[in-house]
Each structure stands twice: as structure tokens, then as C-alpha cells.
Image (cartoon, coloured by chain):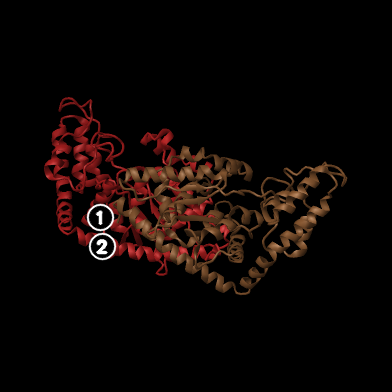
Chain colours: A brown, B red
Amino acid sequence: MNQKNEKIILTGDRPTGPLHLGHFVGSLVNRVKMQDECKQFVMIADMQALTDHASQPDLIKESILQVAFDYLAVGIDPKKTTIFLQSLIPQISELTMFYLNLVTWNRLKHNPTVKQEIKQKNFQESVPAGFMIYPVSQAADITAFKADLVPVGDDQLPMIEQTNEIVRKFNRIYKKDVLVEAKALIPKFARLPGIDGNAKMSKTLKNAIYLSDEPDILKKKVMSMYTDPTHLKVEDPGKVEGNPVFTYLDAFDSDKESVQKMKDHYAKGGLGDVVCKKRLLEVLDNFLAPIRQKRKDFQKDPKHVLDLIFKGSEDARKVAAKTLKEVKDVMHMY
Amino acid sequence: MNQKNEKIILTGDRPTGPLHLGHFVGSLVNRVKMQDECKQFVMIADMQALTDHASQPDLIKESILQVAFDYLAVGIDPKKTTIFLQSLIPQISELTMFYLNLVTWNRLKHNPTVKQEIKQKNFQESVPAGFMIYPVSQAADITAFKADLVPVGDDQLPMIEQTNEIVRKFNRIYKKDVLVEAKALIPKFARLPGIDGNAKMSKTLKNAIYLSDEPDILKKKVMSMYTDPTHLKVEDPGKVEGNPVFTYLDAFDSDKESVQKMKDHYAKGGLGDVVCKKRLLEVLDNFLAPIRQKRKDFQKDPKHVLDLIFKGSEDARKVAAKTLKEVKDVMHMY
């Protein structure tokens, strides 16, 4: 908590592409809400993106702006939320260096989230050291702002545990409670399936609907969505559970009653996929149209958006510098 | 090389105690010479000291001044050499974070110097991650100043190789020769044995003669030195090779002829250890007296010495900031 007794939230995204509906449901919507209740820091994590995209600096540079456009378009308000660029906060690197001495090599090797990601990314023997230590760098992100709350998916819980281990060890060794333990904030709708039915919508899996998708692309994606593969004829009963069309309707259609009716009808048989998809397209288009428009307005003036990021980074740097000073003081450093 | 076409040297010490004769012979004497021939940066490596002394911040703080006193006492001249404190150069941490993405976890695990040190330090399974990655942090130290030359013992050659691997990979990926490969500079007298005959003089082995040792302590240490354990009676022939008394005489007695005579006499038999030790004591006392005096003068005004370090760190920071800017530019970062 800060002096105004507000809870502090730290969250963010790796800039490796524009944001999609999965990001909206899993985090963006909560940020728009939380910015009125907490002191919120939203980090564009370009340093973290480099840990597995070191040879794609242009993708990262381009994505920083794309992510910022998405933030502003969905209503993250730089007057309420501090939007900043990770690489503009050198204090995070400095804190990372200190924390690396408090974590054993073995502990890093056995971080469940990292182990899982190494498998997914097919790194095998060539996993970059920067990737292996990113839980420590994440502890630096979180503690630099003394965040109380960190919104994460449940697969990311070990990262928060790692952060808190570092916090406790630091405070114990240096004999003062300078760092603050963080609590995971697990969102209701943590994850949206991809349009192909995969449990996770992701850029890598090419199964995402982007906030910036134009109507024709949106239409193509929705109409080609995975549904119930056993639902061959309209009159057949269809599966609602695990059918992404209905998951999306649950997430985006505010007319809950009509969604329930469609589900019942679909399950009973007699409701075709095309009808459901058309309804979903209508809902998503209504949802995305104003976001798309706002995004285009911001895209017209990228310089202004960059300035917002720089201004936010300046504010974030002041907070991180204050923490670093406290950290160095209890470590009796010059 | 810098714009003045001078070679650039980066060297330094971990502040974990005052410096001893081994440091003098292996590095300090060369630094006094090199400061007239090159652009020399001497780093007090407090960040590196933390990698295996994280819970001893006071030892590090105290040692920073001790090391600086030693530097100034032996004639490292802050007007010619940039003496700086590693933790005051945040750019080194930032560069380290970039370089960690260019080195595989596996590569770090197999660094021969680190493997050897892990054994010596008896870390076993609890080696700190900060310690494992210190070769990468060292690459950041070296490249931040675009050092051409790095004085190292031959056991440290793999560290220079790791640095140059990073340099080549960085320049290749980011398509510009921003970073400079370094050459190891192996000193003639790389290593002085301890007074116990151990191959290496070191604080940990408690076999060191410190530059700051008072005459009575010096006398005690010299008179108790390990010699040839088979040389029981004065008239016995003694072993010169591996006898630290003669190694020290070789290093510190400028009267080479007299040293040779003593060696011959000792080998033949008829020359007692005590005579040799007395001569060594005389030589070392002559050598240390002015250093001890100069050190005391500096110790009277620690604030002045700290200011010299801060001033050097400011200069070093400017150089490192210039390198970091070039690095971030070719990485297309903001």
C-alpha cells in the first residue's frame, strides 16, 4: 500500500505482438476497473520479451506501440494508470542483480512455470540464461513498485511464490522489512480458448482474435471457429461445454438470457453452428467497433503515445529509484 | 582503443578484505606501470563481491575503503587511472541483462573457472544464481568500457573467452560491431605463494602478508614462513624451488646477485632458514614501509578517498552510459 492507503498493483505484457481477446478477458478488463480502486502500474515488459526474442528487436520495438495502442483503446487511462516501459527503469536490472544472489541456481532450475515454458518453447539444451532467471527479474519488477497485488493466471502462481521467497530472504538478511510480499490476483475469466478450440488463445498458436482485427478478418475468424466436431447436422444435439463459440458468448454477450436459450437449444439439437456464429460475430463486432475506432485515433499520433509511455516511465522510475535507495541503504551500500 | 588511440584496460578487485603482496605482485605493480601507457579503469567490484558474500554487506562496505587505501598507497594515481565502484554504474547491470539472453544456461554451467570456484567455495547444491552468472556480469564490466586488455591469471582465461563469445554474438545479431573483443593480459608474476607454502596467497587461506601489515605482524609472518621441511640442520642442503622465502626474494629483492648467492649457498648446505628469513624481512620491510606510511596518510581522511571514488565513478558512468546508448541503439530500443 502507498501513503494514500491504496493497494498497489503491478501488471503488464510482453511486447511481442498486438493484444487479443484473451488479453482483454484475462487482464485488460480488470485493469480498466482496478485503475479506479488502486494505484496501478502497467509495464510493457520489453526486457522480458528479449529473454526469448533476443534476435527479434524489431518485433519488440513495433509491438511496444501496438500494445500501448491496445491499452489506450480499451480504456486504460494514463491519468489513472502509470503505463511504463521496462527497459527505461534501470533500477529493475539493478534489483535483479541483487536478488540473483539470494536465489540458488537449483531453485531456478525447478521453477514449475519456467520448466513448463521451456518445454512449450522447445528450448531443450539451449535455453538462454536470461530466460532461466526471469522469475528473479519478475521479482524485481514487482518489488520495485512495492506491489501488493499481481494479477496472474494460475499457471503463474510459482512466480509469485518465488518473488515472496526473495522478499522474505532479503528482509531477513538485511534486517529490515523494506520489500513487500505480493498476493496473486487470479481473474475470474483467466483464460479464453483459441478459435481452434485450444485451451489458450495465443499469437504463437495463430488462434487469436486481435483487438485490432478489421471486420472482414473478424468475420473470417468467427465463421471458421472450432465448435463441436460431432455436431454434423443441425438437428443433432451439440456440445456446449468446451465449445469456444459459447465460451466467447459467455464472455462478451451481455444478454445472458439469450445466451442461455441458445445453449439449451444447441444442446437439444436444432440449432446450427452458423446461427450461433452469426450471433457471436454481431456481439464481437459491437464490442470491438469502438475499440477499433479509438485505436485508430491513437495510431494517427504515435509520437503522442510514445510521449505518454515516456512520461509514465519517468514516474515509474521515480518510484523504483526510491525503492532501490531503500534497498541499497539496508545493504549498507554507497 | 579510445579516440586518443590508447589501449583501454579494465581491471579491479572484489572488496572482501585489504590487499596483500599477492595482489601487488600479480596486479598492482602492473597497474602503476600501465596507467602511464594506457587508459586504465580500476573497478572495486562490490556487485561481484555480493555474489558470494550477500549476507556480509558490512565486510564489503569496509573493504571498499581498505582496497582504495591500498590502491592509493601503492601509487595508483586517480589523476591517471579511473578508480570506480561497480555498484555506482547501473549500466553494467543493464548490459548484464541483455547479455544473459545471448548465453545458454548450459554454457554457464560448464564454465571451467566457475566450476573450479564452486568446488573451492564448497557451494554444492546451493550455489547462488548470481554467482553462476558472474561471467556474464564480467562481460558487462569489460565491454562497458570497451576494454582491449584485461589482466587476468591463467585460471581466468575462460572468463575472457566467455566475454568474447558474447561480444561476437551481440555484434552478429545486432549487425554492428559495437562491442569490442578483449585480450587477456597474463602477468609475468601471476601468483605469489602463501606464507604456508600453498600455491596461492589468499585471505581465505589465512596465509597472506597484507600491504597494511604492521612491522611486528610482518616479522611474525616472515619468521614463521614455510620453507623446505627436509632442511632440518643448517649444514643440510636445502630446496630452493617451491621455497616461498626465495620466491618472495625473487619478487621483492632488487639485489638479484645477492639472492642468487643465497640460493646457491642454501642449496649446497650451510645456510640456515633464519638468515634467509631475516634478509627477506629486511627487504619486505623496506618495501612496505613507504606504502604503509602513505596508506596511513590516506586513512586519516577517508572522506577524501570516498570522494575520489565517487568522482571516478562519475567518469566511469559517463563512459558506460555512452556504450549502453550504442548498445540500445543497435537493439532498436527506446
Give the structural element (helix, strand or loop) at label 1. Answer: helix
Q: Which residue is mark 1?
A: B68
Q: Quadrant of the N terminus of chain A?
A: bottom left
For label 2, the residue is: B308
Where does the image place residue A208, in percent across and percent down from the top left?
A: 70, 54
Q: Earlier in the sequence, mark 2 or mark 1?
A: 1
Question: Is residue B317 at all visible to an observer of this figure?
Answer: yes
Q: Could you tell whether A235 is left or right of B155 in the image?
A: right
Which chain's residue wears label 1? Answer: B
Q: Position of residue B286 (x, y in %)?
A: 14, 49
Q: Name the amino acid, label 2.
A: Leu
* Residue B313 or residue B334, whichever sits in front: B334
Give how far apart the Cα atoms at labels 2 and 1 are. 9 Å
Location of residue B117 (image quadrant)? top left
Callouts 2 and 1 close, C-beta under 8 Å: yes
Q: Nearer the viewer, residue B155 or A184?
A: A184
* Lateral position of residue A299 relative to residue A160, left or right: right
Circle count? 2
Q: Chain of mark 2?
A: B
Q: Quadrant of the C terminus of chain A?
A: bottom left
Name the residue rendered at 23%, 25% in the picture. B230
Q: Amino acid at mark 1?
A: Ala
Image x and y of residue B6, in percent? 39, 65
Taking the spot 27% from the left edge, 52% from the top edge, the residue there is B64
Could you confirm whether marks 2 and 1 are on the same chain? yes
